[in-house]
Image (spheres, rainbow, N blue to C red):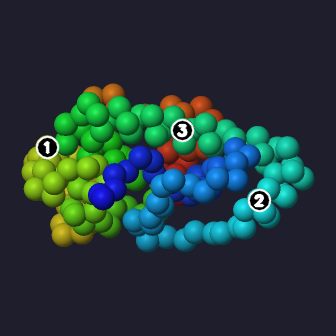
């Protein structure tokens, strides 16, 4: 079975939302770290204890869970209705929102798997994005040059509405840290 991206998590988020939502069920999905970085772990019981001790912590984690669910719904619409270029531009922007540095270190094979298309479709789309001045790319690396151009290519499928509304993603401050 081939996977497909349903949501992206960066420094703003976490996996294990079933614990935050009060369930003992195991996640039905697989989580993969696609871009180099750091991650932290906490045992489910320790997280439950921390949430029980802090209503504010639990409230923040629930706001993130809401933003995450919004992102999953937006991904479902994009995967069901959009062309390769729209899905790829959405994914590049969302990844760029969540990473440190000035580019995305991923192969076309990984990008294809994330958006659920064949690799040649990603190759064609990346070449078109480069021709239009939206990105610069070389083997295994993509630098976004024109975010506005990529956003227009998304045809409304890219938004930070849920994450921004819930206060868990601030693109402008992420860019300022670079």
| Residue 80: percent from left, percent from top | 29, 34
Quadrant of the image occupied by residue 159: top left
Tell us which disc is closer to us: 3 or 1: 3
| Residue 89: percent from left, percent from top | 27, 44
Q: Residues within 10 Å of mark 3 (few under 14, many from 20)?
A: some
| Residue 128: percent from left, percent from top | 11, 46
Q: Residue at x 46, y 40 (%)?
A: 72
Q: Is residue 158 visible to the viewer in this orientation of the structure?
A: no
Marks 3 and 1, the one that precedes in the sequence: 3
Task: Determine the CA span between mark 3 and mark 1.
Answer: 33 Å
Query: Can you say whether 51 is above or below 41 in the image?
Result: above
| Residue 116: percent from left, percent from top | 26, 50
Kindly state the secondary structure of the residue where label 2 is placed.
helix
Proximity of marks 3 and 2: CB atoms separated by less than 8 Å: no
Q: Residue at x 54, y 42 (%)?
A: 68
Numbered label attached to residue 1: none
For this orientation, the residue located farthest to the top is 156
Task: Determine the CA span between mark 2 and mark 1.
Answer: 46 Å
Marks 2 and 1, the one that precedes in the sequence: 2
Q: Residue at x 48, y 61 (%)?
A: 31
Looking at the image, residue 76 sits to the left or right of residue 160; the answer is left
Q: Which residue is mark 2?
A: 47
Q: Which residue is mark 1?
A: 132
Q: Which residue is mark 3?
A: 69
Task: Determine the CA span between mark 3 and mark 2.
Answer: 20 Å
Kindly state the secondary structure of the residue where label 3 is placed.
helix
Looking at the image, residue 21 sits to the left or right of residue 139; the answer is right
Kindly state the secondary structure of the residue where label 1 is placed.
loop
- Toward the viewer: 161 or 77? 77
Q: Is residue 156 visible to the viewer in this orientation of the structure?
A: yes
């Amino acid at each position: 079975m081939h996977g497909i991206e349903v949501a992206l998590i960066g420094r703003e988020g976490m996996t294990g939302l079933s614990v935050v939502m009060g369930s003992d069920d195991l996640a039905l999905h697989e989580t993969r770290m696609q871009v180099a970085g750091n991650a932290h772990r906490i045992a489910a019981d320790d997280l439950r204890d921390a949430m029980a001790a802090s209503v504010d912590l639990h409230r923040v984690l629930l706001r993130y869970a809401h933003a995450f669910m919004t992102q999953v719904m937006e991904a479902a619409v994009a995967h069901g209705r959009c062309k390769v270029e729209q899905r790829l531009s959405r994914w590049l922007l969302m990844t760029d929102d969540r990473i440190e540095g000035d580019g995305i270190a991923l192969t076309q094979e990984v990008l294809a798997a994330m958006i659920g298309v064949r690799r040649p479709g990603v190759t064609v789309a990346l070449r078109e994005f480069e021709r239009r001045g939206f990105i610069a790319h070389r083997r295994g690396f993509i630098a976004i040059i024109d975010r506005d151009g990529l956003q227009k290519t998304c045809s409304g499928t890219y938004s930070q509405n849920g994450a921004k509304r819930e206060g868990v993603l601030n693109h402008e401050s992420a860019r300022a840290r670079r």
